[in-house]
Amino acid sequence: MNKCWLVLCMWGLMLLVSCSVDAPPASVPVNRETALALTPQATATLAPTRTSVPTAAATITPTPTLEPTAAPEETATTRALVDVSYCTRSFGPANGARFSARLDRVRTDQTDDFEQITFVFADTSGALHGSASCMLAAAWPADADLGASAAPGARIIAVSLDDWAHDDLFAASPLTETVEITPSDVLEQVSFAAASLDSRGALLGIGLREPRPFRVRVQGDELIVEVARDEIFPPDDDPLGLTAGDAPAVEQPVFFLQAGDVFRLQGGRAQAVARTPELETGLAVSADGTLLAVCRAPADAEPFALPYGVRATLWTMRPDGSGQQQLADVGGCAEPAFAMSGKTIAFTANVAPSPPAVLQVWTVPTVGGEASSVAPADEWSRSLPHWFADGRLVYRASNGSQTIIFVRGVDGREQEVTAQMLTDVTYDGVGQFVVDPANGQLAIEALRTADDGADLVVLRADGSSVAVEQRGFWQRPLAFTPDGLVYLTTECPSESVLRYTVHRRPPRGSIETMFSGQTADGIGAATTQGDTLLYVRSTSDAPGVRGPSVEPGLADESSIWAISVDGTARAQLYTSDSGITQLQSRGP
């Protein structure tokens, strides 16, 4: 399957079961007649049984079956929920090659702890192997012409058998379009999908009524998926969403974008700063808190084209919405950022007359004047401007194949600060980053070459390394505070439940773990006010890995939370039934 962010589930150990077998024979591609023979047929609904007395397996018939079978006798070991998580995980040998097999039947079992689905293969040549993950129905392959075109449930445990050869044994498998599982409080249906023109690969889908942790293993010619029955969803061990201690001090106003308008949150109340027919798509607050900068797009702008693909302009206003004036109109506006002096605003604009976008960073004096691009037109598309306290600009740049970070000096010269980090094969680009203006440091998501995860790399403005953190699947810097960098570690990729740890890296001393937990919510924009971290949570069900999540959609329920940097005080400041983005505060 294509490398992508799949919908994935809880954290724990990957279960790798290897075996040694003879190499599989050369595969035979599926021809037109075989493809037609595999056209799915309707099947009867069958119920799993729950018993401690083994029963005989059903006789194989030419039509596919979903067999209820007896559960094996349980022991203390089998009852323990070991290796169960919401994470993606591999099974079989990690370096497995193409294998050949016939899927004979599907069996269902129940135990006190698990709903179990067993895919029974026969005439297997080569080792059964693949990966399993929990994903949204939207990720089910709609273009597959074998099997089910619709997902077997709103949430799915997807078993990817990418190396299953499309040969005569594959063609002889009694594959069904959809089989219902009843009665079950957890499982709904089992489905199959494949492309007849491919020489290998198939997807087995187990529909869930709601996300559940699971595990998967290979036992001989059987592929066994066990789904935890009684786990609570959403998880309740979620300190980022639980009030604790006294409410953190948030004395200055907090600004954010919601439903296309700028809002001000202060004293527990939020009100619109200015309501306009246009859409506010970008927001910044000056260091002294006396001025706001916003990007303003037409009211009929297509949401999918934001923020770069629409004609937007840069405006400024006072924190109460008065004194509005248009500051720059260069064809586009996104990601405004005030210099620490407050005298200049940087922003991103798309300068391409048609797709694809070509992004450039522009600057304009706060008092008004001509806007100018900070770099000549070349192969780099520049965006996400930040400032150091001494007036140097920091921004990300991409040439279509690589993403780097430039620092532009006050003399106008650019220096790539990620050059040393990207010289070896460990990383192939950068993701999000945050800047410590006073100390001239950057904390970066360093995108790994070997997998879809990211390490945390802290650099000085000259590109020299301060620290590298390699924990879990993904590490996202949230913000620099006076007490150090606060960042979030995701233990594994998941589109259902984010298992996280929040760390603090002080300027001196050892890294501190603030707390750990798991949540079904997304964690979005973050900012600081003194020693308090402010962040957005959302209930977004949009496809995407929960760690490096996309911003909430317009219809997503969202909330703003505050947490002290020692983690002892946490409180929800505001909640809304629509998406909150671009969280900003001027600090103390």
Image (tube, helix red, strand yellow):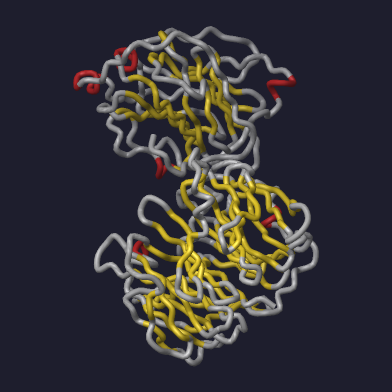
Is residue 530 visible in the rendered structure shown here?
Answer: yes
User: Residue drawn 58% across and 38% down?
Assistant: 86
Picture quadrant where residue 25 is located: top left
**Depth order, front residue of 385/546:** 385
Q: Position of residue 335 (x, y in %)?
A: 46, 70
Q: Position of residue 269 (x, y in %)?
A: 63, 78
Q: Is residue 183 above or below residue 521?
A: above
Picture quadrant where residue 505 is located: bottom right
Picture quadrant where residue 438 is located: bottom right
Going by the picture, which residue comes out furthest to the bottom?
323
Is residue 559 visible in the rendered structure shown here?
Answer: no
Q: Considering the image in quadrants, where does the C terminus appear?
A: bottom right
Q: Position of residue 391 (x, y in %)?
A: 55, 77
**Depth order, front residue of 294/46:** 294
Q: Considering the image in quadrants, where does the N terminus appear?
A: top left
Q: Position of residue 122 (x, y in %)?
A: 43, 10
**Depth order, front residue of 83/145:** 83
Q: Is residue 8 above or below residue 37?
A: below
User: Residue drawn 39% across and 19% down?
Assistant: 98
**Depth order, front residue of 341/116:** 341
User: Residue drawn 58% across and 87% down?
Assistant: 290
Total count of labels? 0
User: Residue drawn 71% across and 72% down?
Assistant: 530
